[in-house]
Image: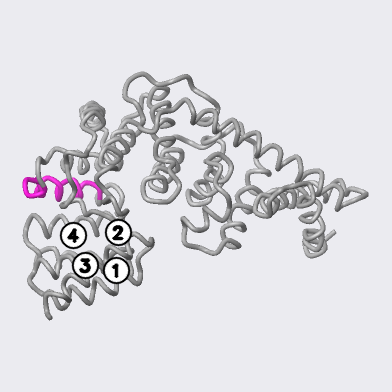
Amino acid sequence: MDEVALRSLIPGVLGVLGRRGVDFAAAEDAVQDALVEALRVWPADMPRDPKGWLVTVAWRRFLDVVRADAARRRREDVVDEEPPPGPVPAVDDTLRLYFLCAHPSLSPSSAVALTLRAVGGLTTRQIAQAYLVPEATMAQRISRAKRTVSRVRFDQPGDVATVLRVLYLVFNEGYSGDVDLAAEAIRLTRQLAAAIDHPEVAGLLALMLLHHARRDGRTAPDGSLVPLAEQDRSRWDTTLIAEGVGILQTALSRDRLGEFQAQAAVAALHADAPTAAETDWVQIVEWYDELVRLTGSPIARLNRAVAVGEADGPRAGLAALAALDDTLPRYTAVAAYLHERDGDPDRAAALYAEAARRAPSLAERDHLNRQAARLNSRRR
């Protein structure tokens, strides 16, 4: 049976699952998994009743997901909302699943999408919304990832670097998105740090703790974003900051610098400043220089331009920004901020409005629109 004929069976299978009480989104995911399995199995062993086979496999997959979700919720029940410092709790199978989903045959983007779906428990729709892509596009990406790993042996699971990248991306989704995965990412990184003596694992854990420590200060009571310079630092979690700084110092003492340690060093300098005005921007620029050297990341270069603007003045920051691609995410917002600091409110207001139209989230869009409105109101 070719793929077109196979997909013609989908409506009937969805109908059967629906009559069994499965909601449409869950049924779609289960059927998608069944189709991937059919493409793998049927060429060698075609069933007599293709539709019945799909219904059976999809139903079993749905039950597996329900059981896995229940198990995940039980694990979450024993973890406090704020990741506690100190000894790591007993290791469960989640970290092992991360290694399996981060198989070397997958790209990091495919690995994190598969991990969010298979381990994080997010629906395809939620993941698509997080990545700002159509649900069909994300479904195809996850299906390709599943198809890839279904053809490989798992005696060579993903290496530490890939798992760290996936954990970092999952943490960022939990830190900035609607689905809170940050605490779970920290829990798993603690487990990894306890199991593996690796400075970059420690660097990632320090980075997560230092960012998570500022979570309560990032939003106002109405849910609006609060820029770092305006945050109430008394709301930052000093216990997490102290733990993160201690872990980072130990990692840096081993003289095996990596990108997560460099990022954590920047976060530590922000956390160490009693006020925004007392931030050591000169050191932050130096750490961004290291990060650019290590990664060549254009986002690191963009953040460096902001730091240069604070350390050496907005004109220097704009000069550093001019060397970058203006299609980078948040490039326009950075340009707006630097032009405002350089005494050009008209240009800054226009750029804030433009950046709002490109914002990746509703909260960020609203913040940028408020910045534009604030500057425009001063001209009236």
Disc 2 and disc 1: Cα gap in Å?
A: 8 Å
Disc 2 and disc 4: Cα gap in Å?
A: 11 Å
Tell me which corner region of the image, top left, top right, bottom left or bottom right, holds residue 334: bottom left
The stretch in magenta equals 276-291
Q: Position of residue 161 (x, y in %)?
A: 42, 38
Vertical position of residue 50 compared to residue 245: above or below: below
Within 10 Å of disc 2 (Cα), the crowding (few <14, some 14-19, many 20+) is some
- Badge 2 or badge 3: first in the primary sequence: 2
Query: Which dot marks residue 325?
Result: 1
Label 3 vs label 1, nearer the camera: 3
Disc 3 and disc 1: Cα gap in Å?
A: 23 Å
Vertical position of residue 272 compared to residue 337: above or below: above
Label 4 vs label 3, nearer the camera: 3
Q: Secondary structure at mark 3?
A: helix
Vertical position of residue 15 compared to residue 90: above or below: below
Disc 4 and disc 1: Cα gap in Å?
A: 12 Å
Q: Which residue is mark 4?
A: 305
Question: Three-letter amino acid code at disc 1?
Answer: Asp
